[in-house]
Amino acid sequence: MTYCVGIHVNGGLVLASDTRTSSSFDDVRVHGKMHVFEKPGECVFVLMSAGNLATTQAVIATLRRDIENPDAAFSLFSAKRLYEVADYIGKVLVANQAQAAENAQQNSVSVEATLILGGQIAGGEAAVRLIYPLGNWISTSPETPYVQIGETKYGKPILERIIDRETTLENAARCALVSFDSTIRSNVSVGLPVDLAFIRDGELRVDRQVRIDEDTEFYTEIRQAWAQKLTEAVYTLPPFPWETTT
């Protein structure tokens, strides 16, 4: 399993993904699920994945091949609008799933993958798209300025309560890390390291990209502060009526 989240606020985009691909008792593996495609000053795209790893790698390979092929009918770097990129990636995803399914028919293995695309093209707005295995997609909105894939339920409450378009980029990133902490605590199939990327609106590049693991002091401070403040909040909730009766 996995967990990825893409957040769209007025200041830009925050994208985060875990790296765990296997979590059996004696076989814990990690693999990056965040892929960056960047042409500074012209366009920037970050793609994150959940689902079949082989399918995802085939999709990424196809995208990079088309970028490098001057005769390709379309590529990430030739797109004029972000919805064109989402449509294109959706078609590549469907094609690679179909090819993988031919080889997996006898094994009952799911070859599906779900993707989060975040990015911006010069002249257009930054945006986040959730691309489904069928190739269709949805976008974030002012009412729901984030999307999740993978093990989504444990990390959703903090995003639902806090994130709106007015949230600063850094606060959105802190919410994303708390969301990951909640998920990691609750599900062994999601684990550190976590890849975190910022795209500031209008900069057309990844502003910062960091990998956070157990030794990252800042992450430890966030986890400890969040746990402490949650405990304090519970202990200061209004009392039951009988607790105040003398």
Image (spheres, rainbow, N blue to C red):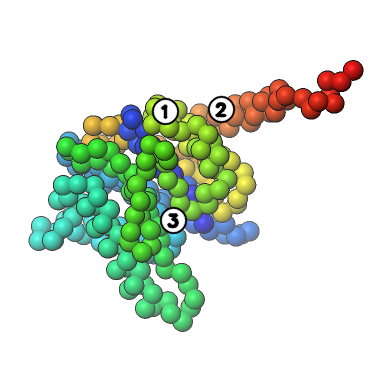
Mark 3 or 2: the one toward you: 3
Q: Quadrant of residue 131?
A: bottom left
Nearer the observer, disc 1 or disc 3? Answer: 1
Count of numbered labels shown in the rendering: 3
Q: Residues within 10 Å of mark 3 (few under 14, many from 20)?
A: many
Q: Residue at x 53, y 52 (%)?
A: 151
Q: Which residue is mark 3?
A: 50
Q: Residue furthest right?
A: 246
Considering only order in the chain, which callout, 2 or 3, is on the residue closer to the N terminus? 3
Closer to the N terminus: mark 1 or mark 3?
Answer: 3
The residue depicted at 17 percent of the width and 38 percent of the height is 122
Q: Position of residue 74 (x, y in %)?
A: 16, 58
Q: Residues under labels 3 and 2: Cα distance?
A: 28 Å
Q: CA distance from mark 1 to mark 3?
A: 26 Å
Instruction: Provide residue 71's location: percent of width, then percent of height.
Output: 9, 61
Q: Secondary structure at mark 1?
A: loop
Q: Amino acid at mark 2?
A: Glu
For badge 3, the amino acid type reads Ala
Q: Quadrant of the C terminus?
A: top right
Q: Which residue is mark 1?
A: 167
Which residue bears the numbered disc 2? 221
Please rate how many residues cluster around mark 2, counting C-alpha atoms within 10 Å: few if below 14, some from 14 to 19, many from 20.
few
In this view, 173 is above or below 27: above
Farthest residue toward the top? Answer: 246
Compared to residue 46, the image places residue 163 above or below, namely: above
- Observer-nearest of 130 and 20: 130
Q: Earlier in the sequence, mark 1 or mark 2?
A: 1
